[in-house]
């Protein structure tokens, strides 16, 4: 394998991550740009409010696969955990700071979930289950995501023992919390929106 190939995969991951599933989906379905409505966040939750569940589901899967596919390619090439997490971070930062949209992107949870699944499908599934349990208990999507992303580095470290992987996942968690700072304030104030009114 050429020495420069892993580095090229990191760049490719960023370029893939920069493609906004929300913007592309809404445009193809004749819906308004999600950046102009509601929270103005190009993510599945905001898309669902104005474009419906189908558009939101496509957005969610698109954002998830942006994180999963580049990391899976790295796995297929038998790259180290250090390179795999760099590839994952590349895709994740592409979503947050997309080259094609003036470096203004989404909050990164779905793409982070894709990275987790790409690194280890079983541990990634545990992170998703953590989100689901938190959603059932608290009925708040953002809080569920924050809890799942907080625990993800610990899950992976327990299974892999990789410090490189742990530190890289902690970095992703820090960015997720930074992008959710307004949601965190709303959670503290008790004004954050619920998943379901029931």
Image (spheres, rainbow, N blue to C red):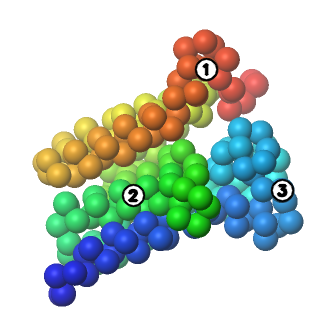
Question: Image quadrant of residue 3?
Answer: bottom left
- Label 2 vs 1, first from the N-terminus: 2
For mark 1, what is the residue? 186
Q: Kindly report which numbered mark, 2 or 1, lies closer to the viewer in this rendering.
A: 1
> Viewed as shown, does residue 48 lie left or right of 85?
right
Label 3 packing within 10 angstroms: few (<14), some (14-19), many (20+)? some
Horizontal and vertical percent position of residue 98: 53, 60
For mark 2, what is the residue? 115
Report the residue at 64% width, 50% height from top: 43
Horizontal and vertical percent position of residue 64: 52, 59
- Quadrant showing the N terminus: bottom left
Horizontal and vertical percent position of residue 72: 35, 71
Question: Image quadrant of residue 152?
Answer: top left
The answer to whether residue 133 is above or below residue 164 is above
- Of residue 184 and residue 75, the one placed in the foreground of this image is 184
For mark 3, what is the residue? 32
The answer to whether residue 195 is above or below residue 2 is above
């Amino acid at each position: 394998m050429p020495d420069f190939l892993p580095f090229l995969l990191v760049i490719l991951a960023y370029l893939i991550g920069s493609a906004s599933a929300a913007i592309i989906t809404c445009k193809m379905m004749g819906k308004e740009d999600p950046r102009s409505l509601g929270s103005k966040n190009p993510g599945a939750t905001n898309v669902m409010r104005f474009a419906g569940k189908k558009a939101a589901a496509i957005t969610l899967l698109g954002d998830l696969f942006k994180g999963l596919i580049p990391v899976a390619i790295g796995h297929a090439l038998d790259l180290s955990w250090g390179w795999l997490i760099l590839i994952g971070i590349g895709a994740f930062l592409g979503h947050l700071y997309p080259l094609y949209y003036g470096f203004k992107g989404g909050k990164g949870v779905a793409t982070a979930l894709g990275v987790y699944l790409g690194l280890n499908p079983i541990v990634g599934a545990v992170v998703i289950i953590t989100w689901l349990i938190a959603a059932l208990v608290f009925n708040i999507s953002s809080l569920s995501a924050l809890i799942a992303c907080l625990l993800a580095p610990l899950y992976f470290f327990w299974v892999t023992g990789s410090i490189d992987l742990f530190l890289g996942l902690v970095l992703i968690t820090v960015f997720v919390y930074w992008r959710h700072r307004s949601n965190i304030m709303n959670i503290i104030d008790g004004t954050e929106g619920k998943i379901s009114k029931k």
